Every structure is written in C-alpha cells, then in structure tokens.
Amino acid sequence: MKIIIIAGGLGTRISEETEDKPKPMVLINDKPIIWHLMNIFSLQGFNEFIISTGYKSEVIENWVHGNKIVDSNSNVMHIATLNTGLNTQTGGRISEVMKTIPNEKVIATYGDGLANISVPRLLAFHDSHGKLATVTAVRPPARFGYMKIEKNVVTHFGEKNQSDEGWINGGFFVLEPSVLNFIASPNEPFESGALTNLAKMSQLMAFQHKGFWQPMDTLREKRELEKYANLLQPPWLSAKYP
C-alpha cells in the first residue's frame, strides 16, 4: 500500500524555518520531520511513499533522489515525488497523486505531524466499516493555561487536560479509489471539499486515536519535537502493533 505525503504548502506559520525549504524538510535534530513521519510507517512494514510537492519542490526532490533513504532500522524506504504545483490545495495534491495509481486504496497524511498510530489497526478499522474514507481523529494538544471560573472567582488554575478538548482532524486518512471523484478541482482544500461532502453522504468514518499526536506549526512545537527525538524511543514510535 502506498502512502501519500502532502508536502507542498508554504509553511507560513513557521516562516523562520521555511524561507529556504518546505516545511516537511525542517530538521528535527539532524533529520527532516518527513523522515520521522516515514519512520512511523516503515517500521510497521509500509515503505512505499509518494510525496506531493509544491513550494521549494527541488529541496525534497534532491533529498529523495540524491540519497538512499533508510529508516531507523536501516530498512530502505521506496520514495517517489510528484510536483503538484505551487498553489494547489490539499485536495488537488491528493487528487494528482491518486490519478497516477488508479484503482488503489491509499493512506494520505500531512507532512508535518507525528503520531504513534498503529497502521494495521487503522486499516483494520477502515476495512471493517466499508465506507469510502477514514480520518484519524485526535485530541488537540492543550496549549493554554485553563481556568475554571465561578461567579468571577477562579476556582481552578492549571494546564487543561488534552482529554478535555474536542476531536480534530489529525490526518492519517485511508481513502478508497473513488474518493478521487469527490475532489472537484486542484484549488479545493481536501478538508472543506471532499471530506465535507463525504461526511454529508455518511461515507466518512473517524478512527479515534488517543495516543501521541503532535503537529509542527510553531517554533515552540519544533523544539518540543526535538526534545522527544532525543529519547531512546520517540513517542511517535511507541505504538503497540497487533
């Protein structure tokens, strides 16, 4: 099964790092975050990747085609790139890649988020419900101090638990080939286009992931991931696989 990695955006929210490279090539210690992401899959036996590029596409292309890229267990990862254009939206990037592998079910995810997701469990869930698409639902990281207020009196002050948050889109989609028909144009975001329409037709199911999940939208989050990467086992590689 092939893994589509969406890696073409401008990365404006972390512009300090993305002036000369696309966001998935931002280094977490000495490796691009996209390498850490691919490790999640490769260490579970899924090592075929297609990277959908756009902004600074040559940086990813040179990295892929100029190196023999292996995971942390020295397994070779098989990687292709497809330049899907500078201004193409997420729906268009997925669509362009899916057109090159017709009639294949795929996994697709963003190139800037890490999670200790069990890929076999994700796929088993998808196959069990028979719908066209699965999105991984995650709890957003608690980013702000939490106050409980009663009649203007602060009765609790502290960190908000991640479990108190609602569910959000964490990426890690499983998509049947016919999802391609729900992507109207290259200029349509996957989230407000295809996913919205699939949900209206009851064809979108949520795989609830309660483990580690962390995006990299800010320098603060980058530094957090760097600390995790120094651990003997980074938390995004701690999934228990069936």
Image (cartoon, rainbow, N blue to C red):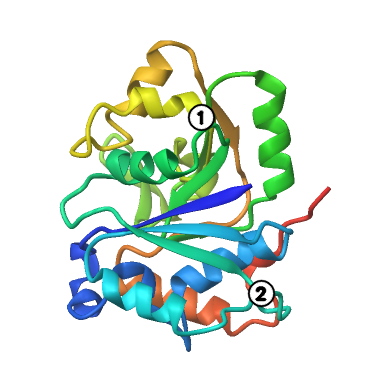
The amino acid type, in three-letter code, at marker 2 is Val
- Of residues 100 and 39, the one nearer the viewer is 100
The amino acid type, in three-letter code, at marker 1 is Pro
Compared to 198, does 34 lie above or below?
Answer: below
Mark before the other along the chain sequence, 2 or 1: 2
Compared to 112, does 117 lie above or below?
Answer: above
Could you tell me which residue is drawn at 73 percent across and 45 percent down? 120
For the question of whether residue 146 can be seen, the reply is: yes
Instruction: Name the spot of residue 60 as percent of width and height, x first.
Output: 36, 73
Instruction: Name the spot of residue 160 as percent of width and height, x first.
Output: 45, 51
Name the secondary structure under disc 1: helix
Could you tell me which residue is drawn at 46 percent across and 69 percent down? 34
Outermost residue toward the right in this view: 242
Report, in whole angstroms, how far the alpha carbon at label 2 lies from the one at label 1: 27 Å
For the question of whether residue 172 can be seen, the reply is: no
Indicate left or right for 197 with 184 as reference: right
Badge number at residue 177: 1
Instruction: Name the spot of residue 91 as percent of width and height, x first.
Output: 31, 38
Residue that mark 2 sits on: 76
Could you tell me which residue is drawn at 64 percent across and 47 percent down? 1
Indicate left or right for 170 with 183 as reference: right
